[in-house]
Image (cartoon, grey):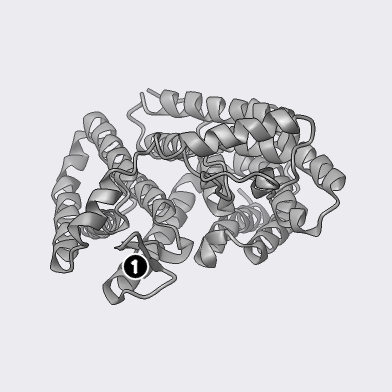
Amino acid sequence: MTILQAIHNQQTKVLVSLPLAVALWHGGFFAGAHYLFAALALVALVVCRPRPLPRDLVWVALVVIAVANVLAALEAGRRDTLPATLTACAMPALYPIAVRLGADADLWLLKAVTALAAASAVAGIVAYATHRGPDAESIDGIWRAGGPFEYPPALALLCVCGIAATMALAASADLGWPSAAALMLLFGGSLVLTFDRASEVWAVVVVAVFTLRLRVLRRLLPALATGLVVGAVVVAVSPPSATALADHLQHGLISSRTGVWSDAWRGVRTRPGLGYGPGGFVRIYRHVDDPTETGLAHNLPLEQAVEAGVVAGVAAAVLLVVMFARSARCLMTRDPVLLGWGAIAGVTALTSLYDFTWSFPPLALLGLIAAARCRQRPSQ
């Protein structure tokens, strides 16, 4: 490898990692962060000029979604569709760059994921301890850590990804065991403070897969368990009221979503062609008095179908199917790097079925990077 090639590779790694860091600014959720994310994607595309473009269903689905969003935005003729439209266009620009990166980029990117997750977890823990928003919030009488995402399930998802990345790095001997144990302790404690039961289950599943495939990683289990216990103790010091806790536990993962999913189907049937415009899910409630009104569909295919039409919704469904397929293949290996990417791709796709994961562009990009790295053929 020449010096120029090495410099170019380093530039590419940085330019793929930077859009992930947008998560540190309001989780990348609000309009300003969408603009920054799109600007970074444009810079990365101009500098890296990935060639040839990938010929796979993920990239095709992303292009279809982007085109559908542009057409829907033009049809809506509203300025507030711009942030979501730019983000939809940024994804097919960044994905080919992630595909073209060599195998030497895997550990770099996993370290970026770990660093981002650790920074977000610390912010969430500090805010929870001080009961200060917006990095922690009181929901129905329960304080929950949200970190820079300002949304506890998003922080919890990133912690699960951080656990996967940490275990992959430790098994690859690219992260010392003391450092890996400290990170597992941090992520375990942060998970508990988000009160997100679903992500706690996914964390257990990810750890189980890793330790079954790579027994050496069992050395990290005490650290994760300690983190979970410490988080539980912190909650016990200032517990929520029994009524608030009961209300939280009765908030079902699926049952709480059925109302908005029904609303989304109604919206799709009303405007199946180009939808209500990117970022315009809430417009389905115009002139409708609906007690289940909310601002997002909590399901990626439905969200896209409502905002950009049925074609975009189908493309989003294809995207998730491919991500699940690649994740399943990688989770059958004993390659720690592919295990890490497989876990990240799988959990990101899974949460996109019941939450608005892809409304946080950095989380969406993290899933796409994982899907790109999972294109590698398992060696065993």
The residue lying toward the viewer, choosing from 265 and 346, is 265
Give the residue drawn at x 49%, y 23%: 325
Q: Is residue 61 visible in this depiction of the protein?
A: no
Q: Residue at x 60, y 58 (%)?
A: 19
193 left or right, relative to 47 = left
- Is 287 left or right of 147, judged from the image as shown? right
Residue 70 image point, x, y percent? 81, 44
Q: Is residue 283 at least partly visible in the picture?
A: yes
Three-letter code, disc 1: Val
Describe the element under mark 1 as helix, strand or loop: helix
Q: Locate residue 114 relative to residue 109 in the image: left or right.
A: left
Position of residue 244 measured from the top left corner of the image (x, y, whole percent): 26, 57
Q: Is residue 4 above or below residue 303?
A: below
**Residue 143's quadrant in the figure?**
bottom left
User: Label 1 belongs to which residue?
Assistant: 122
Picture quarter with the C terminus: top left
Residue 155 is left or right of residue 78, and the answer is left
